[in-house]
Amino acid sequence: MNVSGPQSHPPDAAGVAVPSDGPSGVPPEAGTAVTPAPGTAGVGTPGAGIAGARAAGAGTPGAGTAVSGIASAGAGGAGAATPAHGTSLRRLIDRYALLLAWIATIALFGVLEPDTFLRAANFTSMFSSQAVLVVLTYALLVSLTAGEYDLSAAPVLTLSAMVLAILNAQMGVPIGVAIVLALLAGGVAGVVNGILVVWVGIESIIVTLGTGTLVSGIVLWISNSEMVSGISQTLVNWVIVPRLWGVSFGFVYALGLTVALWYVLDYTPLGLRLLFVGRGRRVARLSGLNVARLRFGALVSCSLLAAFAGVLYAGTSGAADPNSGDSFMLPAFAAAFLGSTAVRPGRFNAWGSFTAVYFLVTGITGLSLMGIQIFIQDLFYGMALIVGVTLSLLVRRREQRERDVAETPED
């Protein structure tokens, strides 16, 4: 291998010339030109390996290394500090802009309605009342990460709550058994979705729209279109009666699920596999991933989490309403997409969605305390969904452009 100094930039060189002052951040004294020796694989050829060159003398720490034509400065290199700092600051703002907006919203309504909005009871009510929405949003996160739209999540929530209420309140089934059967009912809906989407090959948005409508009809049928009350007080005690600093345990369950989902999606091989499948099924399949099993598992997991949200709803209200899930669909999708612009921009993530749920409910609560009519809720959630989808798409496009620029070989 022939390694020449920074002055060697022949126009027709067979190797890759690393510019001495280019955007890679390699200082003038660290620029190298790497030329493959005769009979060896060139850069960019499969199996070429890593071509390394140390600057300012062999063995000097901090020298740059050229890997498949991409130059990166070592720890001791001078680097382009200003652009890197600007990029880091921009990414930091992207990550926490929604959290800052939430804090600003609290401050705004605190100034406008200090006597009512800033009361501790108002905040404990907001945190406690949104546990069901948080869990349903997380159900959507799993399927959306895998690239599947599940429109049956809210109807499955209603089905779970109604099955639990009928079994426990009307048929006298013990509450523990009723909860298990309610979760199984949700799992069955997920299996049906998975079979039709993965093995039959129908688009998920079409399948789940159909199964969601079917499930809604089943709920109306088994309930005679009436609310079922009288759910065991034991479940109510598990969900809303215990208090932690004034906040119900429903919120604690949702917070625990947030931590668990954050860990699974961000730090486990399963989470990364779901992400790869969602970003490109063909590439994931060529990489050796079992795409069908991952998609199927995502749809079943979505329905199981939606069923768990139904159990929390039944425990929160002590009853089951055949139309209860209708009011959760739009807020859950709005929070999922708006949350994908925060914490991990461009990715559906647990903490971003958690922040989005409470940012939205804070705005709606503040407007309600100011006497704004109830239709503002639909306007708020609808606008949040549009903004969330738009920003998520823009973030992904920008990340793709940055990757394309980083992978473009220098001339």
Image: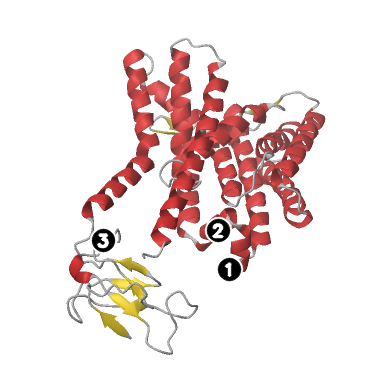
Which residue shows up at 33% across the image and 40% down it? 93
Looking at the picture, which amino acid does disc 1 mark?
Ser
Specify whether residue 249 is in view. no
How far apart in space, not on screen, are marks 1 and 2 (Cα)? Answer: 10 Å
Whole-percent x, y for residue 207 in the image: 75, 44
Above or below 340: residue 408: below
> In the image, 365: left or right of 176?
left
Q: Residue lying farthest front?
A: 11
In this rendering, the answer to whether 352 lies above or below 198 is above
For marks 1 and 3 on the same chain, the one whose residue lies earlier in the sequence: 3
Q: Residue at x 49, y 11 (%)?
A: 372
Q: Nearer the viewer, residue 267 or 37?
A: 37
Q: Is residue 115 above or below residue 122?
A: above
The residue beneath circle 2 is: 276
In the depicted view, which residue is nearer to us: 250 or 196? 196
The image shows residue 83, relative to residue 36, as above or below, that is above
Q: Amino acid at mark 2?
A: Phe
